[in-house]
Amino acid sequence: MAERPPISKLVVLATGGTGGHVFPAEALAGELEARGVPFALVTDSRGRQWQGALARRPIHYIHSASPSGSLAKRLQALLLLGLGLFDAWRALGRLSPAAVVGFGGYASVPTMIAARLRRMPAMVHEQNAVLGRANRLVLGGVSKVATSFARTRFVDDRAYLVGNPVREPVRALRGSTYRAPGPDRVIDLLAFGGSQGAASFSQVIPEAILSLPQAMRARLRIVQQCRPEDLEKVRARYEKANIVAELAPFFADLPQRLAGAHLVIGRSGASTVAELATIGRPSILVPYPYAADDHQTANARAFEAAGACIVIPHAEFTAPALAGHLRALFEAPERMSVMAAAARAAGRPDAASRLADLVIGVAA
């Protein structure tokens, strides 16, 4: 006879629509599904694009918006959030969940407030080293805060360190071995930063690479994410210097690219840091300066404190600064091996399982 699930009533997952919030929600959904725990998703219209376990269960859509921009836009957002609270109140009344789990993003706020008003057990998961604004808004109604970093700003004694769940293709590469490049061997360099990082990366990284000694440049094999409008310009610069480079606006196989890299240059979003830690790769991180509450700097500094990366603040991200770090690392590859080991030690591949344990505890 199959083992009975630990709880019979379902768990509601409430999340915003951006990747940083969606990935851990998807990971938890997969873990709950594997354990036979029913769940449902409450989100805004962006939830229609999701796949995996989240897409195999009912999705309940509510109104939401981010209260930013002009006064008119903020007022409109508050109205939509009010409508979302009404939507969420009705949805939770129909679903009668054992627990509600929020993952941040303003789309999660109405559901978490509705859970508090209905006195339902609730908790949140925070991906960054700074508790996000949406999660701070609903903090009064939760019993536990699952964190991804050992120290997370704005969290009290309700914090439980579980880590930041990553996608299955990333977890599958946990066992990939890191080997630093030997003398005169190829150096695989991966650079990616999304739309918010690729603009400055397209200018600074080629300039830094071209300033390296010729013998060092000849060893490089570069994979770099570029905005479509920057592709030809960056490609021309590398080709003129006879540098092997693969450029694209998006890499569908990014986990495999991470595993194959000797060094990574990137931003320090929560998912990026978690994936670097899970696979165990050394990195140079340039925090995106306009992230809310400067949470990317907090993420990067926490990772740096573990010995896993080098941090270059965005204001100091210049070609000479980057070239200096690259030269130092390539001349002493054993440093990259130490950083890779530190990154791997900081990884928590069981984060989804630990989060599911916490959720079931709250529900029970």
Image (cartoon, rainbow, N blue to C red):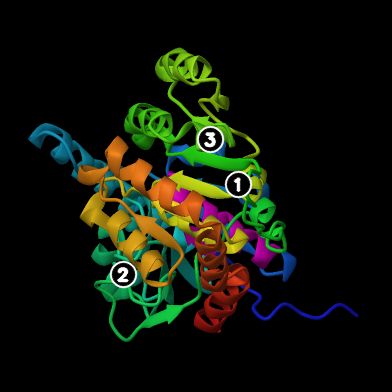
Quadrant including the C terminus? bottom right
Q: Give the farthest residue toward the left.
A: 71
Residue 48 rendering spot, x and y as whole percentages: 54, 37
Seen in the picture, residue 162 relative to 72 is either above or below; the reply is below
Q: Residues within 10 Å of mark 2 (few under 14, many from 20)?
A: few
Number of marks in the rendered image: 3
Q: Name the amino acid type tagged 1.
A: Ala
Instruction: Give the residue at x 67% y 81%.
Output: 6
Quadrant including the N terminus? bottom right
Residue where numbered disc 1 is placed: 261
Instruction: Give the residue at x 48% y 39%.
Output: 191
Task: Report the mark closest to the observer, 2 or 3.
Answer: 3
Q: Name the amino acid type tagged 2.
A: Leu
Q: Is residue 103 visible?
A: no
Q: Quadrant of residue 209?
A: top left
Q: Give the farthest residue toward the right.
A: 1
Which is more toward the observer, 66 or 245?
245
Which is more toward the observer, 72 or 301?
301
Residue 300 rendering spot, x and y as whole percentages: 35, 59
Residue where numbered disc 2 is placed: 117
Magenta stretch bounds: 12-33
Question: For this view, does 283 lie left or right of residue 293?
Answer: right
Residue where numbered disc 3 is placed: 215
Q: What separation in Å lies between label 1 and label 2 (alpha carbons)?
A: 49 Å
Which is more toward the observer, 228 or 101?
228
Q: What separation in Å lies between label 2 and label 3 (alpha carbons)?
A: 66 Å
Instruction: Give the residue at x 64% y 54%.
Output: 170
Question: For this view, does 82 lie left or right of residue 352?
Answer: left
Q: Name the amino acid type tagged 3.
A: Ala
Q: Is residue 16 magenta?
A: yes
